[in-house]
Structures are given as C-alpha cells and as structure tokens.
Image (cartoon, grey):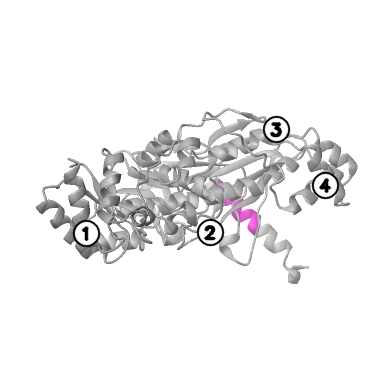
Amino acid sequence: MKYLRENYTMLFDFYELTMGNGYFLTGFQDKISYFDVFYRQNPDGGGFAIACGLEQVIEYIKDLTFTEDDIAYLRSKGCFDERFLDYLRTFRFTGDIYAVPEGTPVFPGEPIMTVRAPAIEAQFIETFVLLTLNHQSMIATKASRIVRAAEGRAISEFGSRRAQGPSGAILGARAAYIAGCAGTACAIAEERHGVPATGTMAHSWVLMFDSEYEAFDTYCKLYPTASTLLVDTYNVLTSGVPNAIRAFKANGITKCAIRIDSGDLTYLSRKARKMLDDAGLPDCKIVASNALDEYIIRDLLKQGAKIDAFGVGERLITSKSTPVFGGVYKLCAVEDKEGNILPKIKISENPEKVTTPHFKKVYRLIEKETGKAIADYITVHDETVDTSKPLTIFDPIYTWKAKTLTDFEAVELLKPIFRDGVCVYESPSTAEIRRYCAEQLELQWDEVKRFENPHNYYVDLSPKLWDVKQLMLHKLTKSNDPEKE
C-alpha cells in the first residue's frame, strides 16, 4: 500500500545543525566517521530487547533532502554560513549503514546499527535514527513480554487512543505485531503496514438501543461470522452473558465471542464460561480487556481465568512501565586521510557510559547440540570467528565467570543496509519480520526470557577489541590526570 510519506529531513536536534556548520567551516565535512547505536539497559528488568524500526529508518534515509523553505528558515536563524546553506541544497546521504534485522533479540552494549559516513551526514541522522529505533524497539519489547505471558492466547493491540500521537499509534501497532500480537484495533496500521485490524463494538453501541438484547441481536444480524459482544455495559452475569447467549441462539451462531472489559476478570470469566457451556456454546470465546499487562495476564491465568484472548491498550502502546528505551548514538571511530580506521572512546565516571571503540562486528554464537543462542561476541571489523577452535567468553558483569564453547556456529548479526548511499537491503514484509522474530525468540533459553531475574546472557569482546579498549582507557585516563602533569 503506497501512501504519502512526510519528509523528516529537518527532524533533528538543533546542535546537529550547528555542528554540521562547524564541520563544514573546519574542513571536517568529508571526514569519515563511525557511529554505533546501542542501548545500556533492558526494559522492565528483562533479559533482552527486540530491535525494531529499521524500515522507517531506511525510508527516512532515502528521502533526505533540504527544500528551499528549509534553507530559508536556517538562513533566518542568522548563525549559518551561506556556503554551508548552499551545500545543503544538494545534500544526500552517501554513507554506509549496517544493522541487525528487525525482530532480532538484542542485548545491552552491542551495536544494533552502525553508521559509516562523512561527519555531517552521520551527525544529521542521529535524532531520527534514535527516535525511530528507540520507540519501536521499546514497544516490540513490551509486546513480546505480554505475548509470552498469554501462553499462546491471542493478544490484540488496543491502544491507539492512548498513544503519543499518530505515529505512536501506527508504528506502535506495527512493532507490537512484529513482536507477536495477533492484530490491532488501528485500521490505518493494516492499510499501511499489513497489521491485521480487528474490532467489535463499544459500550456506546449497546447504549444506542432501547435494550441490550436488541443491540446484541442487531449486531449478530449484521456480522453473523464475526460476532463479538461486549457484555459488561450493565451487568456481566445477570444481563450481558444471558442476552449474548439469547442473541447467538436466535441467529444460529455458534462460533462467536464475548468481551469483558471491567470487573474481576478471573471470577467473571469462569462464571461466563460455565454459562456458555451450559447453553451449548462451547466454541464461544471469552476476550478480556481493561488496563492489562504481562503481570496481570500472568496472574489471571494462574488464578484459573477462562480467557481465550486479550485486548491490551495503554500499557502496551506506551510501554507504561518503562516508557523510555534509552538507545544512544556514539562516535566509535574516524578515518584518517589514508583510510586508516582510528578508534574513538568516550570515558565517564559512570562505568556504564564508557563506550566500546572501533568499527565492529557482532556475532551470535549458537550451540549446535541445543540450537540455542549461548552468547554474543563483539569483534573488530577485520576479525572472524574460527568455529573449529574452542572459544572462551566471559560474563560482562561477573567477569570472573567464563564458559568455553567447542561445538558452535557463529552468525554475523549486522547486515549491510546502505552502501555509498544506495540501499542494498530489501525490507521484508511486516508479516515476514514477525515470523523471523518468532524464530529468533526460539533461539533464546527460557531462563533468558524470564520476567524477573532473567539469566545474564553473555555479551563479550574479542581479546583484540578488549585490548584496544583497555589501552585507550589507560592512555586517556593517564593523560587527563592533573596529578600527572
């Protein structure tokens, strides 16, 4: 489905413009720079995140172009050199981008995207890249948790009206579907991204009629093959369920559903299930909604709730419990005039903010015997993993803990997306990404997928990369120590 895309070239933090102008005036505009996108902490204290949003980054990169109105606005600010403004007239992205495919489980500290481009180009795209990957990865990660809590029961995303703006609703529905939701209430998400849109009725439908039964009977006549009746407008057990049963039977409908949107969902669903079964409607499904999340769903099922599917809204579409993903965009290397890659590192008094330098590769190590992922391994760009030899990896937190791998395969995660400004990656359909995500989640151990206190997945640096990082840290901390001067 084709639709008009808005040009987001000017969607960046203003300092990217002032730095761009500065790079231009100091001759840095063509200096090849490497930036990594990564995050530092898993949402909700989980064991991993789901990378999402690459397709929208690709669309944005393809559309990068400054209009005359953009340039006129920048001129009005009075702080940009006219030569820089003239440079923007023919601006386009000419660099390289590498990224993990959407739907890939990812872990803190490892690059999920690397940008190699002239300094101005790499700096300009920072804000859009981060807001897109941060938002959709956040929603996909939350949706994955909710889907796993439902233990095979369908989850529908119901949150459009509580989303932070139109893009939050549309792309949030896309991310939720990729992570395993069965569909969405957001119609435009199906039109644009192929996310199955579903819906039934609101309480207003019931209130429009003189009686609840008349509302149900009319709906059954209009939608005999898709009748889901909302039974809590008045009273679920004394009114809603009996009237739903009566309407279904009057219209000869046996494959149907009721939805409960309030009250004690465990108690009401168990009572409703018995009423439906006693009425000869064992195939009638029970759908529950009302401010649900993974913890509530898990508890409902533990309590014996007779619920077949869930509608989840605000706590999914806003990732209410962890509403910020925290991805960052950091310089990790530059090239000199001879094309040599010079690693760069940011140090900090907060250890978690110290970056890993250099242009890198990320490998996922898969144990052949179990077919499960056992570690991720970050190397310098010119390294390969020799799977014919034992490989020892270390826990990134408890660094005295190590494991030696002997029978494994190494899968490179970062794929080429752009080369010399040309897209070399064919974006899969949303449904294909969803299937890929499910397959990749199967590679993760259940211990990593726990909601609380998940197993600490190993993400280690190769000895070569470790040595580069430690040498740079030693040199920088020594050179910046005033007592050594």
At label 1, which amino acid type do we have? Ser
* Foreground of the two, 23 or 404: 23
4 or 1: mark nearer the eye: 1
Distance, label 3 to label 2, CA atoms, is: 31 Å
Q: Are marks 2 and 4 in contact (CB under 8 Å)?
A: no
Q: Secondary structure at mark 2?
A: loop
Q: Which residue is mark 2?
A: 324
Mark number, residue 94: 3
* Mark 4 Cα-neighbour bin, 10 Å: few <14, some 14–19, many ≥20: some
Q: Position of residue 419 (x, y in %)?
A: 63, 30
Mark 2 or mark 4: whose residue is earlier in sequence: 4
Mark 3 or mark 2: whose residue is earlier in sequence: 3
Q: Position of residue 201 (x, y in %)?
A: 36, 50
3 or 4: mark nearer the eye: 4
At label 3, which amino acid type do we have? Thr
Q: Which residues are magenta?
A: 465-473
Mark 3 or mark 4: whose residue is earlier in sequence: 4
At label 4, which amino acid type do we have? Leu
Q: Which residue is mark 4?
A: 74
Q: Secondary structure at mark 1?
A: helix
Q: Is residue 289 left or right of residue 467?
A: left
* Mark 1 Cα-neighbour bin, 10 Å: few <14, some 14–19, many ≥20: many
Q: Secondary structure at mark 3?
A: loop
Please name the residue shown 30% across and 59% down the image: 297
At label 2, which amino acid type do we have? Val
3 or 1: mark nearer the eye: 1
Q: Quadrant of residue 316?
A: bottom left
